[in-house]
Image (cartoon, rainbow, N blue to C red):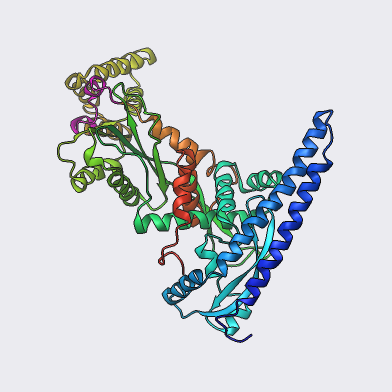
Amino acid sequence: MPYVTNDDSKANRRITEIEEELQEAKNKFEQWLTDGGTMTDAAQLALREREGKVLTDRLQALAVALELQRALANPLIHERERTLAKASPKKMKDFGYRPVTVQFLGGIEVTVMARYWCRSQAAADKGKGSFFGLVLLGVCDRTTPALASEVAQLAAAMGSLDEARQRLAQMGVKMSVRRIANVAYYFSQRARRHQELSGMGIDGSVKGRRVVISTDGGRLRVRKNKRGKKTKNGRTRYRTDWREPKLLVIYVVDEKGRMEREFAPVMDGTLEGPDEVFRLIEFYLRELGIDQAKQVLFIADGAKWIWTRVTQLWERLGLEGVRRRELVDFYHVVEHVHALAALNKKWSASYRKQWATRQRHRLWRGALEAFLADVERLCRGKRGKDWARERDYLLRNARAGHLDYAKARRAKMPMGSGSMESAVRRVVNLRLKGAGIFWHEDHAEQMLLLRAYYKSKRWQVLVNKAFTTPLAIVT
């Protein structure tokens, strides 16, 4: 096939063909309307609905395909394709129009003609090129933007990719599990790349509001291939290591300390460790205008990896004139108080409970000096890792000012990180963690983003970003 740049006859011919197919579909729909009779039961109504959906799905697909084909024949799109070709790491040539089948929102597939760009004739023959025009219009993996959004959302919402496949089939969209995975992961990848380039475009302002920030880790299993011989069936051996994804939650509370429903929480997650999750926290706080907030509370469990980075976060953000608070989750602290009491085997079970309850009340009232004195008295002369771990946890956080719950109550601010615990359960445990569930690391990273935005009701943000096409995204 010769190298060509201006053969528009194929595109124009396809426009005419789609127009004819569209007219035929209109005629069939009008005939269906004419043939409709009087329904007498629910079964007939259901049948008419299904028949109508098949016809209207085809009408919609052909109508949009006609607009898509006209756009692909537009000189403006051709010029933008050339720009992408020049921006590619390797020189790309226009090998003219080629047929490509695109699947539309209702599941209907329509063939359009699009310019094929590739490095060489040999590479083009092997299918190693790209349809830049389709990419510019958001058609990736032969799937329209609207359908890709639905597929990615179902992949995030359902318990597995196979459940997503079954639900799509019920909607009239036939896709394999592999293709669903490709569409969903590429959707997530595009959104994350755009976030890195120009921000995520989170809507909502925290100006004059009371903001709560939290982070914590979950658990999932990552699949790692092993070196050496394969199994008798020719499969690569692998191991499944536990990994801790780090999640973040940012939300707003009213003057009574209740979460504001008008402000959808911001949630995200990563497998790349503590520094990356704090980079994301800083990124989102800057985008929300945290320097204009009324109050800011950082609340989490007592893990050292969190609190050693919170101070650095405040320094980077500045936040002059913004009241900042830091709290360790009250209920985590109470658990450690009970764990410390349980180490003293000389006490009866009832006295251990009585001692822990007394410390709980002191924490609640703000009697920190009495609390510290009792903890130090109990631990005096005690040796062992368990004693040292519980003592250091309580004393370290108390001296850092992270246990001042009385002030937090008076300020009507949360004392627990229940929202964070809920996020870990909804984002990780109910989708990415389970018996027999293993993930490739990059796929787990992409699913974390999809799941977090789906559960925080900010899905449209991902849609807006996944289908913008700056030059740096298209390679």
Residue 359, located in which quarter of the rendered image?
A: top left
- In magenta, the rendered stretch is 397-413
Q: x, y (%) of residue 191? A: 45, 54
The quadrant of the picture occupied by the N terminus is bottom right
Residue shown at the point (34%, 52%) measured from the top left: 276
From the viewer's perspective, tell me whether residue 4 is left or right of residue 331: right
Residue shown at the point (64%, 63%) measured from the top left: 235
Q: x, y (%) of residue 258? A: 35, 24
Residue 362, can we see it?
Answer: yes
Picture layout, residue 353 above or below residue 163: above
Picture layout, residue 43 above or below residue 469: above
From the viewer's perspective, tell me whether residue 333 is left or right of residue 192: left
Name the residue nearer the viewer: 450 or 104.
104
Q: x, y (%) of residue 94? A: 54, 79
Name the residue nearer the viewer: 421 or 69.
69
Name the residue nearer the viewer: 198 or 156.
198
Residue shown at the point (50%, 69%) measured from the top left: 77
Residue 391, located in which quarter of the rendered image?
A: top left
Picture layout, residue 138 above or below residue 419: below
Residue 325, located in which quarter of the rendered image?
A: top left
From the viewer's perspective, tell me whether residue 417 is left or right of residue 448: left
Magenta span has 406? Answer: yes
Residue 440, can we see it?
Answer: no
